[in-house]
Amino acid sequence: MKSVFITGAGSGMGREGAKLFHAKGWRVGAVDRNDEGLATLLRELGDDRLWTRAVDVTDKAALDGALADFCAGNAGGGLDMMWNNAGIGESGWFEDVPYDAAMRVVEVNFKAVLTGAYASLPYLKKTPGSLMFSTSSSSGTYGMPRIAVYSSTKHAVKGLTEALSVEWQRHGVRVADVLPGLIDTAILTTTTNHSDDGGRAMSAEDLRASAPKKGMMRLMPASSVAEAAWQAYHDPKRLHWYVPKSIRVIDLLKGLSPEFVRGRIAKSLPALMPKRQ
């Protein structure tokens, strides 16, 4: 039986991933600091193929221990797939976001991915064809205003993915990531706006009503990212998975002219770039 360990599995993309891999017959390790979300998942899917634990992914000892305990129940003590998915966001002008809040984003969105890489490698090395998969973001293709720290962490995840995809070839371990665009998850409606300029977190209903119906910034379901994770395990050639696929255009254009992309972002996202006196 194949196995996957997913961080941030109590809601959103991680939850959908746990459901999909479980439905495919995999043994699923689901961790999240949100124990209520895990309890709901356990009630919905609960059987001996679903393993859950409340874990703060910024706590190295806790994540190490969770992986060790989960993998002890796998055939050969290995792991087929590690999905570093946990993430948080803070928004606002850079100088308005409190330092501690910004550092928390770095801790969860990037440092925890590093921790997950260190913690999972011994188990991935035991398993032929294994994969470390991480959640980056469309904001990891070009630096995004008003979410500067979040965007920077997602660039870091993308860079780490590219580096380890080469390094870990010597271990027989594959590395890939997913770069989602606008995904219908709680982070979109719960992220704190720290700037007093009229910005606010939108309700889920407002977000769904106002989001583009077409194009790369259309609102996508969390299940679409879970499907990308499933496909990534079965496609050893692709490094970056874009959801939707048209997000890749940003990467391509940035390579040709980063100044052009900067101008387009400033023009197309006026709500994120209000004028200040």
Image (cartoon, grey):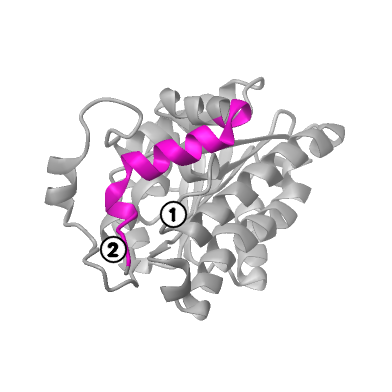
| x and y percentages locating residue 209 in the rendered image | 12, 41
- The local secondary structure at tag 2 comes to helix
In the depicted structure, whether residue 219 falls above or below residue 155:
above
| x and y percentages locating residue 213 in the rendered image | 20, 29
Image-based side of 274 in relation to 153, left or right: left
Give how far apart the Cα atoms at labels 1 and 2 are: 18 Å
The region drawn magenta spans 254-276
Tell whether position 273 is magenta.
yes
Q: Is residue 182 in view?
A: no
Q: Quadrant of residue 64?
A: bottom right
- The local secondary structure at tag 1 comes to loop
Mark 1 Cα within 10 Å, few/some/many (few <14, many 20+)?
many
Q: Is residue 67 in view?
A: yes
- Disc 1 marks a residue whose amino acid type is Pro
Residue at x 54% of width, y 26% of height: 253
Quickly name the residue at label 2: 190
Image-based side of 98 in relation to 40, left or right: right
Q: Quick one: label 1 or label 2, which is nearer the N terminus?
A: 1
Q: Quadrant of the N terminus?
A: top right
| x and y percentages locating residue 208 in the rendered image | 17, 43
Mark 2 Cα within 10 Å, few/some/many (few <14, many 20+)?
some
| x and y percentages locating residue 202 in the rendered image | 19, 57
Tell whether position 133 is magenta.
no
Residue at x 71% of width, y 47% of height: 77
Residue at x 56% of width, y 72% of height: 103
**Residue, far front:** 277
- Disc 2 marks a residue whose amino acid type is Thr
Quickly name the residue at label 1: 145
> Which secondary structure is most common in the magenta stretch?
helix
